[in-house]
Image (cartoon, grey):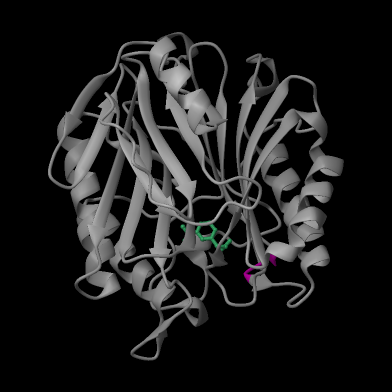
């Protein structure tokens, strides 16, 4: 793909409710979507953009919004179960599906709906998906609920003609409260570039001990854009090869997670310590008491370039105590000029 043809990347910011009110006035008609995090349902007045609420406690404030904004006016489209907005290059969408059937059937339904929608609108390339799954570590028929989720997701990818390992987006999957499966996503007209982590087995190649169907996500996805590229880094945890390391030791898991974040960012040829890179992170902690430790470790590793939103959530493996995701914005196109190296991962 030629850079000159790429669409402008969407902008991301974390905001308080007061700031979102100002932002929506300033950016009227350009907001792609706003996702509220917090333990209280919000009474957001009907706004001109897609909104979702994830029932997940924040660790430092009551409510925060993750807000995606386009540089151009967006086109809105809402259906019964999917709310969306799109510009020339990207489509943001959110789905909330009631869990009134098994989780594998529910995730199959959600992803089939998602793929139908983006295919028919011409934004067939899924770049990033956020998955919030109630009781993610719970057991159902002898299988962890996360594994049920993976079965439905994998089957929906295949049914929609997606090639696992090629058409695999950056993602995260965390435990939420409440009864609904919440999924939101960014899809694009142009494909992104899949990035794997040389320290980790590709998740879509995890062995069967982690479930009958592998998780369908890439470690990161690079979106080329008109001004500067954006790297979507998937939820990243203390996993080396395919194994969890440092069970029971949150500080050691934080160090390993940071090593993984650095490795995947380096793989995309982005210098995370460089002044030209901005990082917006969400840090998920099983135990709130680990928050100061993780915040300090991220600050030490990534400095003032990083903005971190801390949330309390169950992580998708029972032995993981924390997980960190990131969006890396580069202010120049230069660091990405060289082609990415091919990676082969052996465990
Ligand atoms: C892992 O690396 C930890 O199922 O979509 C991270 C990112 C994890 C995405 C997903 C799961 C997912 O396997 C968990």
**Along the horizontal axis of the image, is 80 left or right of 163?**
left
Q: Quadrant of the N terminus?
A: top left
| Towards the viewer: 59 or 228 | 59
**Along the horizontal axis of the image, is 104 left or right of 345?**
left
Q: Picture coordinates of residue 338 (x, y %)?
A: 66, 23
What is the span of residues highlighted in magenta in the rendered image?
A: 238-242
Residue in the picture at 30% in, 33% down? 50
Q: Picture coordinates of residue 192 (x, y %)?
A: 45, 33
Q: Is residue 339 visible?
A: no
Q: Is residue 211 visible?
A: yes
Residue in the picture at 39% in, 91% down? 142
- Residue 245, above or below 322: below
Q: Quadrant of residue 233?
A: top right
Queried whether the magenta region covers residue 194, the answer comes back as no
Q: Quadrant of the C terminus?
A: bottom right
Instruction: Give the tally of numbered discs.
Output: 0
Q: Picture coordinates of residue 257 (x, y %)?
A: 73, 56
| Towards the viewer: 311 or 276 | 311
């Amino acid at each position: 793909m030629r850079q000159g043809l790429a669409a402008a990347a969407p902008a991301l910011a974390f905001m308080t409710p007061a700031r979102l009110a100002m932002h929506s006035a300033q950016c009227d008609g350009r907001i792609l979507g706003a996702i509220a995090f917090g333990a209280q349902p919000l009474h957001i007045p009907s706004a001109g953009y897609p909104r979702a609420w994830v029932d997940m406690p924040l660790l430092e404030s009551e409510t925060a919004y993750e807000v995606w904004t386009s540089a151009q006016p967006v086109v809105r489209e809402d259906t019964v179960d999917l709310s969306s907005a799109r510009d020339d290059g990207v489509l943001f969408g959110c789905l909330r599906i009631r869990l009134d059937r098994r989780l594998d059937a529910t995730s199959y339904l959600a992803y089939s709906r998602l793929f139908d929608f983006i295919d028919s609108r011409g934004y067939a390339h899924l770049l990033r998906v956020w998955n919030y799954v109630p009781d993610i570590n719970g057991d159902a028929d002898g299988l962890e609920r996360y594994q049920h989720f993976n079965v439905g997701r994998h089957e929906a990818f295949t049914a929609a003609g997606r090639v696992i390992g090629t058409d695999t987006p950056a993602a995260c999957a965390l435990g939420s409260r409440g009864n609904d499966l919440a999924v939101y996503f960014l899809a694009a007209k142009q494909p992104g570039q899949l990035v794997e982590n040389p320290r980790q087995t590709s998740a879509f190649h995890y062995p069967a001990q982690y479930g009958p169907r592998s998780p369908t996500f890439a470690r990161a996805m690079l979106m080329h854009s008109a001004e500067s590229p954006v790297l979507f880094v998937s939820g990243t945890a203390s996993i080396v090869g395919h194994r969890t390391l440092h069970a029971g030791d949150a500080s050691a898991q934080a160090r390993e997670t940071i090593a993984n974040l650095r490795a995947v960012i380096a793989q995309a040829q982005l210098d995370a310590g460089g002044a030209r890179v901005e990082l917006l992170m969400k840090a998920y902690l099983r135990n709130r008491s680990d928050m100061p430790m993780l915040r300090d470790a991220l600050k030490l590793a990534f400095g003032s370039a990083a903005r971190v939103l801390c949330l309390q959530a169950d992580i998708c493996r029972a032995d993981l105590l924390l997980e960190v995701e990131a969006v890396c914005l580069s202010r120049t196109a230069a660091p990405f000029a060289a082609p990415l190296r091919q990676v082969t991962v052996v465990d």
